[in-house]
Image: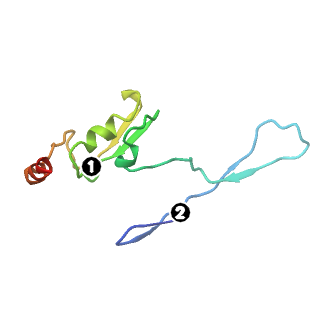
Amino acid sequence: MSFTDDTRVEHVFIPRISLTPYSSEFPFEMTRRQFPVRLAYAMTINKSQGQSVKIVGVDLRTPVFSHGQLYVALSRCTSGEHTSVLLSSDASNSTTNIVYSGFVFLHSEA
């Protein structure tokens, strides 16, 4: 599998695992090989606005770039127990609400 972004390509090898049932109704042994992956979905914070989901994971390794995005991301889940946040290893457990005064001023004139 290859993952790409604008600057690099990273190759990740996912090993296959063999599964053999302990008890079988058949006179022969069956073995199934599969990749240990799980289906997942992702969407942007803007796309998630107005939706409710059962489980939410928010990647904050890069900070949100717009006022209110963190609130939208964290409030999509119907239960706080099913909300997870991924932080970078050097991050504190807090964030700063940044509001650019020039944008607010321009926006209020319109």
**In the image, is residue 23 above or below residue 8?**
above
Instruction: Answer with left or right where residue 84 lies relative to residue 25.
Output: left
Would you identify the image quadrant in which residue 96 lies? top left
Q: Is residue 58 left or right of residue 95?
A: right
Q: Dot 2: within a 10 Å radius of its alpha carbon, few (fewer than 14), some, or many (20 or more) residues?
A: few
Distance between mark 1 and mark 2 Cα atoms: 24 Å
For label 1, the SS is loop
Question: Mark 2 = which residue?
Answer: 13
Instruction: Give how far across and how far down residue 109 sits, in percent.
Output: 11, 50
For label 1, the residue is 89
Looking at the image, which residue sits at the far front? 110
Q: Please report contact status of discs 1 and 2: CB closer than 8 Å, yes or no.
A: no
Q: Nearer the viewer, residue 34 or 101?
A: 101
- Checking the image for residue 8, the label placed there is none
- Residue 11, horizontal then vertical, whole percent: 48, 68
Q: How many marks?
A: 2
Quarter-of-image position of residue 73: top left
Three-letter residue code for mark 1: Ser
Q: Picture coordinates of residue 103 (x, y %)?
A: 13, 53
20 vs 54: above or below: below
Horizontal arrangement in the rendering, residue 43 relative to residue 20 (left or right): left
Task: Give the residue type at disc 2.
Answer: Phe
Q: Nearer the viewer, residue 92 or 18?
A: 92
Task: Give whichever of 28, 68 is nearer the camera.
Answer: 68
Q: State which quarter of the image contains the N terminus.
A: bottom right
Residue 62, placed above or below residue 3: above
Query: Can you tell which quarter of the image residue 58 is in?
Result: top left
Q: Residue at x 49, y 63 (%)?
A: 12
Secondary structure at badge 2 equals loop
Depth check, front residue: 97 or 108 = 108
